Image (tube, rainbow, N blue to C red):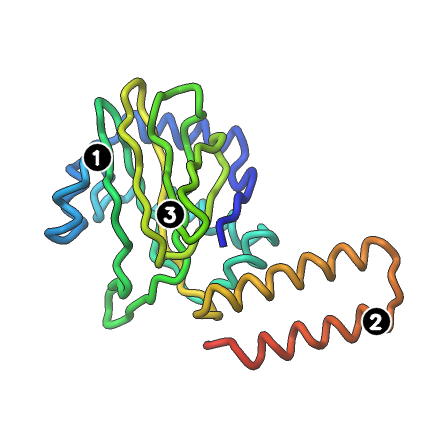
């Protein structure tokens, strides 16, 4: 499932992020990938040990905790703390698949089920830089307003097109969902959206209650905690 989540961050939050990131020290993005990824990756990232990364990442996770659309789609169990990257001067990241198991430290690990990119530059600020996600329906180009997020299955082949003018700033991170299977997550998301629409339309309360029970029983059956 490919889903656009608008306005995860407010304009004031985005502007604050940009001021801090414009003054930050960046490092070679290839430091965080393996041999294959390093062959197609050309960007900059905040260092893994950066206090700024932890601070801004915490703000993002706090915003997501209040976002019902994101929660309904991702059904998050664990997060890899958000990272930050910068593409400019032809910077790109060729087609790749995200790693399946990621280290959270202190013996804890995360299975990457859902990949997320939170855009911090507006589309008119740079040329190129589209996130391209490939699935059975073809290739989908994504370039969202600053503060908006795209989520998609971590199993997807994807790339970032070369940035040939300006700079593209973004945050990216991964989620281990309570629901491992993307098809099951999609069904639950669609059912939840339908239930919200039915509640808003004044539909029969008994029928809505019955469907709500079915939703939670499916979640109970499929969830890993």
Residue at the location (60% across, 52% down)? 69
Find residue 168 and report its image quarter.
top left
Find residue 129 and report its image quarter.
top left
Looking at marks 3 and 1 on the same chain, the residue that comes earlier in the sequence is marked by: 1
Q: Which mark is residue 43?
A: 1
Q: Nearer the viewer, residue 15 or 99?
A: 99
Residue at the location (83% across, 71% down)? 207
Label 3: state its secondary structure. strand
Relative image position of residue 34 (x, y in whole percent): 14, 53
For residue 18, above or below residue 202: above
Looking at marks 2 and 1 on the same chain, the residue that comes earlier in the sequence is marked by: 1
Relative image position of residue 177 (x, y in whole percent): 45, 65
- Locate residue 221 relative to residue 47 in the image: left or right: right
- Locate residue 131 relative to residue 39 in the image: left or right: right
- The Cα–Cα distance between marks 3 and 2, rounded to whole angstroms, is 38 Å
- Locate residue 143 relative to residue 106 in the image: left or right: right
Relative image position of residue 160 (x, y in whole percent): 31, 37
Which residue lies under the disc numbered 3? 134
Does residue 11 appear anywhere in the picture? Answer: yes
């Amino acid at each position: 499932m490919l889903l656009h989540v608008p306005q995860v961050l407010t304009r004031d939050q985005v502007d604050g992020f940009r001021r801090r990131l414009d003054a930050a020290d960046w490092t070679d993005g290839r430091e965080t990938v393996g041999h294959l990824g390093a062959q197609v990756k050309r960007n900059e990232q905040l260092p893994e040990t950066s206090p700024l990364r932890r601070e801004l990442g915490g703000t993002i996770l706090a915003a997501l905790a209040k976002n019902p659309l994101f929660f309904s789609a991702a059904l998050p169990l664990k997060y890899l703390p958000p990272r930050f990257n910068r593409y400019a001067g032809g910077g790109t990241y060729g087609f790749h698949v995200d790693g399946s198991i990621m280290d959270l430290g202190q013996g804890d690990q995360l299975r990457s089920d859902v990949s997320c990119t939170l855009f911090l530059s507006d589309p008119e600020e740079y040329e190129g830089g589209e996130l391209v996600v490939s699935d059975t329906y073809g290739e989908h180009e994504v370039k969202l307003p600053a503060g908006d997020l795209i989520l998609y299955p971590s199993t997807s082949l994807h790339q970032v097109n070369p940035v040939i003018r300006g700079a593209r700033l973004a945050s990216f991170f991964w989620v281990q969902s309570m629901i491992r299977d993307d098809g099951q997550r999609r069904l639950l998301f669609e059912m939840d959206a339908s239930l919200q629409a039915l509640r808003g339309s004044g539909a029969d309360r008994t029928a809505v209650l019955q469907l709500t029970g079915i939703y939670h029983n499916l979640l109970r059956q499929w969830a890993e905690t």
